[in-house]
Structures are given as structure tokens and as C-alpha cells.
Image (cartoon, rainbow, N blue to C red):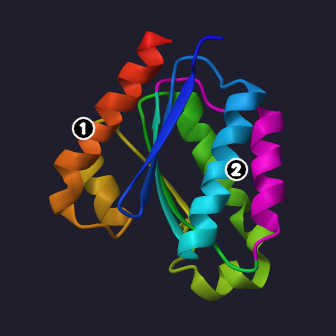
Amino acid sequence: MKRTLAFALTEGLMVLVHGKEPPSDAEWDRYLDAWFVFLGQRGESRLLVVDAGGPPTSAQRQRMVERVRGLSRPSGRVAILTEAPFARMVVNALAATEESWLGGIYRAIKRTPGESYVYRAFGKEDVRRALTWLELPLLREADVRRTIAALEAEIARG
């Protein structure tokens, strides 16, 4: 089976790379399981998603929302690097639903009206801005870029 998704942990950050096609259910579930282990170890996560146009299916996104809904507080922050208009639309839709699935927690932490606490989309090359929003040190930028390149190569190899 051709790989369409790859992820790695690097010093408190999970980097997730999507290929051009949506991930298989097995790949998505493997990622979700790893992310929840990461989250359980840290209590809060920082996730950098690099999207080449193959976002999770609606059923996969629903499984993610159901698992996140079971958390007692926000899980952290997610920065999405993408040039795909559809992916940006998905990010905006997820951000718009934060209040409904985080409820009172969301209202207590939300900074300004219309601002997402959890999700933010950036251009594909905006690693530095994404790291700043994720509240991670900029000195990690080179390491993060190497991790992204390695994960993209994994997907390219299939």
C-alpha cells in the first residue's frame, strides 16, 4: 500500500506530513494512536501538519473530533502548513467548531472573538511563523525543516 501520511516526534513537537491523497484508515488510526500517546505523556501537544493536498476524509476527521471531545481540556495547538484552498477551508471549519466541542473550556481560554486557540493555517514555507504560533523556540527551525524533508521523502518513496 502506498504511503500517504508520515509523522515523527521531535523534542515536544509532532510533525505530521500528508501526501497528495487522503490517508488510508489504517494510516490515520496509527497516527491518532501515536498522537494520543504523545499527548498523554506531555499533557499538551504541539502539532505541525504539512499538507500536500491529501487531508483526512470526513469520517477520519470525525473520529479525531470524537477522541478530542473526550478530553477534559484543550489538547494544545495545531499549525497547518498548506497552499491548498480546501485544506485551509477545513482548518477554518474546525476552528469554527471549537466552541461547540470544547465548550466552557474554549470560552475561558479564547483570546479574541473569531480567533482559534487550537488551529491556525500558514503558507507551506511559513515554518518560522508556525513555530512562533506554536510557542516553540525558533532555533529549532532547521531541525523541523529537516524532519519535514525526511517525512516528505518517506511518502515519496511510497
Q: Tell whether 97 sits left or right of 75.
A: right
Callout 2: helix, strand or loop? Answer: helix
Say above or below: 111 vs 36: below
Q: Which residue is mark 2?
A: 33
Residue 119 in the image: state x and y as whole percent.
54, 57
Main secondary-structure element of the magenta-colored stretch: helix
Q: Nearer the viewer, residue 86 or 143?
A: 143
The residue located at (60%, 11%) in the rendering is 2
Mark 2 Cα-neighbour bin, 10 Å: few <14, some 14–19, many ≥20: few
The residue located at (67%, 31%) in the rendering is 27
Q: Nearer the viewer, residue 95 or 118?
A: 118
The residue segment tinted magenta is: 52-71
Say above or below: 5 vs 144: above
Say above or below: 115 vs 25: below
Q: Tell whether 108 sits left or right of 65.
A: left
Q: Tell whether 82 sits left or right of 57.
A: left
The residue located at (69%, 79%) in the rendering is 73
Which residue type does callout 2 highlight?
Asp
Which residue type does callout 1 highlight?
Arg
Please say whether residue 128 is visible from this viewpoint.
Answer: yes
Mark 1 Cα-neighbour bin, 10 Å: few <14, some 14–19, many ≥20: few
Say above or below: 153 vs 115: above
Q: Which mark is residue 135?
A: none
Residue 67 in the image: state x and y as whole percent.
80, 58
